[in-house]
Image: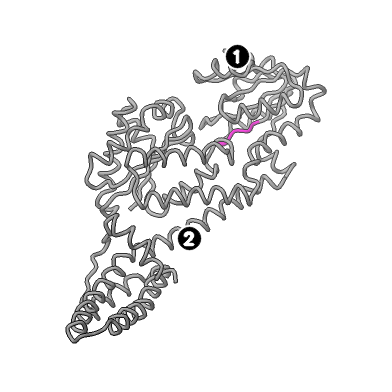
Amino acid sequence: MLLCLTASHHNASFDLLEKLSIGAPGAAATLVASGDFVSGAVVLATCNRFEAYLDIDEPLTAASAVAVQRVVEVVSAASGVSPAVLRGSVTVVTGHDVAEHLFAVSSGLESVILGEDEISGQVRRALENARAAGTTSSSLERLFQQASRTSRGIKSRTAVGGAGRSLVRLGLELASSRVADWADARVLLVGTGQYAATTLAALRDRGATNVAVYSASKRGGPFALSHSVKLEESLEQALASADVVITCTSAETPVIVPGIMRPGRRRIVIDLGLPRNVDPAVAGIEGVELLDLETISLHAPLEELNAATEARAMVDEAVSEYAAVAAEQAMAPAVVALRRHVFQILESEIERARARGDDGQAESALRHLAGVLLHTPSVRARELARSGNAAEFTAALDALFGISVPNGARLSEAVARDFRDDDLRDLRA
């Protein structure tokens, strides 16, 4: 069964995520080596996101709490983040919701900038690192490979990759009717993430040269230095002198509120944050005009702005197919048990034929007959699994042949590989 622990800009501070990005990647090997119930682990850790994907052997009801606690302990030790803080910052995802989450993450639908390209490569490298460390499993391989296919499909069939950049462009286009010359405008950029870098590039494309940046975190200095902009130490003072203010942080509460915005001067405030970076009440301050994401979307409903809906639909499609294939593969132990039962009978009859002096014709006919007889049950197993009626197949095996397949039975990796290479052909015939 699959389980995921996730923390991102949605529910964790960037300082915490930064610590995790340094210490957490090496935790996968410890998780697999230290617990009998963890058969595979893939850890993805970036400056904006921490993800730990686990393949656990026992049913979720029995092992999930233990697995979560173990992940927290191991990652805490590796990153220096206290267990209490880490446990309070992660969200636990289980079952097929894990697939939906990873597919959305790898497609950039959960990123600060919608549809960002970098995350798909990070997801791919996380799997490669797990392979190199020997911590992946067949279930995690299927999960991550399907995530990559889903991401590629979304990028090729939707405009989601341009949606985040389009919001910036649209906001600046709306503001341009209020800005006589961007070269003369004093612009304050609040935020230092990828969205801020994208916004700065768009500003420079429009000719803006007088750009300053403010950040409540320690990231302001490095951002200002690497992007050659002025660093503002006081947000209130910076707001007092700016002509255009653009916010694009992942803060959970507004960073610009009426108390720090002085009335009188004419200013345009563009809020690109989600959730809001600017208190809507700021729009009531004399001289201030507020453009938020809702306003931008209403005034310029381009195709890119609807891309996320289309991409989410594709994720749902991919999850449904993934779940169906997983259900088929869960039937593998039952189908293998049936084949073994038939082959045991087959070998006994072949031995009898040989004892009677068979020249090989009877053996060939018996093997062909066994294959024909097994084909329909194999196909029916696939159909019943996809329709959610796998229990009917296992019940029939027990009733007709006395073959008992325990719930949650799993094949060994070696047998599973043989089954995928050979027996699964029957299921997909």
Mark 1 is on which residue type?
A: Glu
Q: Residue at x 71, y 34 (%)?
A: 169
Residues drawn in magenta: 271-275
1 or 2: mark nearer the eye: 2
- Dot 1 falls on a residue whose secondary structure is loop
Q: Compared to 249, does 227 lie above or below?
A: above
Quarter location, residue 196: top right
Residue 110 position, x and y percent, is 52, 41
- Dot 2 falls on a residue whose secondary structure is helix
**Residues at circles 1 and 2 in contact by the CB criterion of under 8 Å:** no
Q: Residue at x 41, y 40 (%)?
A: 128
74 on left or right of 280: left
Q: Which of the marked residues, 1 or 2, is nearer the chain's N terminus?
A: 1
Residue 272 lies in the magenta stretch: yes
Return the residue nearer the eye: 412 or 367. Answer: 367
Return the residue nearer the eye: 425 or 305. Answer: 425
Indicate the colouring scheme: one colour
Q: Residue at x 64, y 31 (%)?
A: 271
Within 10 Å of disc 2 (Cα), the crowding (few <14, some 14-19, many 20+) is some
Residue 302 position, x and y percent, is 72, 45
* Disc 2 target residue: 321
Return the residue nearer the eye: 160 or 68. Answer: 160
Residue 357 lies in the magenta stretch: no
Which numbered tag is attached to residue 232? 1
Residue 92 position, x and y percent, is 37, 44
300 on left or right of 106: right
